[in-house]
Image: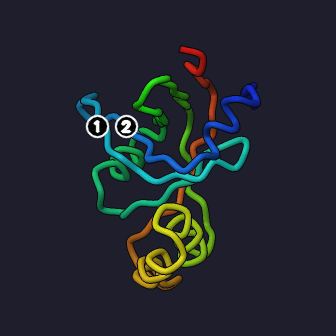
Amino acid sequence: MVNISSEANTFLTQTQIAVISTVDSDNRPHSVPIWYQWDGSSALMFTGAKTLKWKNLSVNPYASLCVDFREPPYRSVVVHGKIRRVEKSIHEFVKNMAHRYYGPAEGTEFAALYPDNKKGVVVFRLVPDKIIEELDV
C-alpha cells in the first residue's frame, strides 16, 4: 500500500469531479471526467462497458486519476495505479455516488436508471502504486 498524507486523504474524500486518464492500444492518452469515491486506500468508479475508457482499461489495466481544485489556492492529488473490476450492487453504488454529486432527490432519480440487473455497467477500483500530492501550492 502506498503512503498518503492525512491532508491528501481528506482532499480525496471531498466531492469533486476527477479526470481519469487511460492509454489506448496505439499508446494514445485518453482523459475524461469521472465521478469517484475515495475509501481511504483506493478510488472506486463506474462506467459503461462500451466506453473508450473501459475498452482501454480492459487491454491495459493502469490509469491515473487527477483530482484538483481549480481556484486559488490551487491543489491536486494524482493517483496512479492498477485497475481491478469490482463485483458489487450497481444500484446501491450508483445511488451513493449520485446522492453525493446531485443530492438526495436528484440522486435517487439518477440511480433509478441503474438497477442491479442493468447490463453493460462496470464498477472498478484504482489501487494506487503512486500518489503525487500538490496541496501546499
Q: Which residue is mark 2?
A: 22
Q: Residue at x 28, y 37 (%)?
A: 30
Q: Which residue is mark 1?
A: 30
Image-based side of 1 in relation to 21, left or right: right
The colouring scheme, among rainbow, by chain, secondary structure or one colour, is rainbow
Task: From the viewer's perspective, tell me whether residue 104 is left or right of residue 26.
Answer: right
- Name the residue at 44% across, 77% down: 106
Residue density around tag 2, few if under 14, some if 14–19, many if 20 or more, within 10 Å: many
The answer to whether 64 appears left or right of 23 in the picture is right
Q: Position of residue 107 (x, y in %)?
A: 48, 74
Q: Are marks 1 and 2 in contact (CB under 8 Å)?
A: yes
The amino acid marked with disc number 1 is His
- Closer-to-camera residue (128/136): 136
Task: Please identify the quadrant where the N terminus is shown.
Answer: top right
Counting residues from the start of the chain, the first of labels 1 and 2 encountered is 2
Which residue appears at 72% of the width and 41% of the height?
Answer: 41
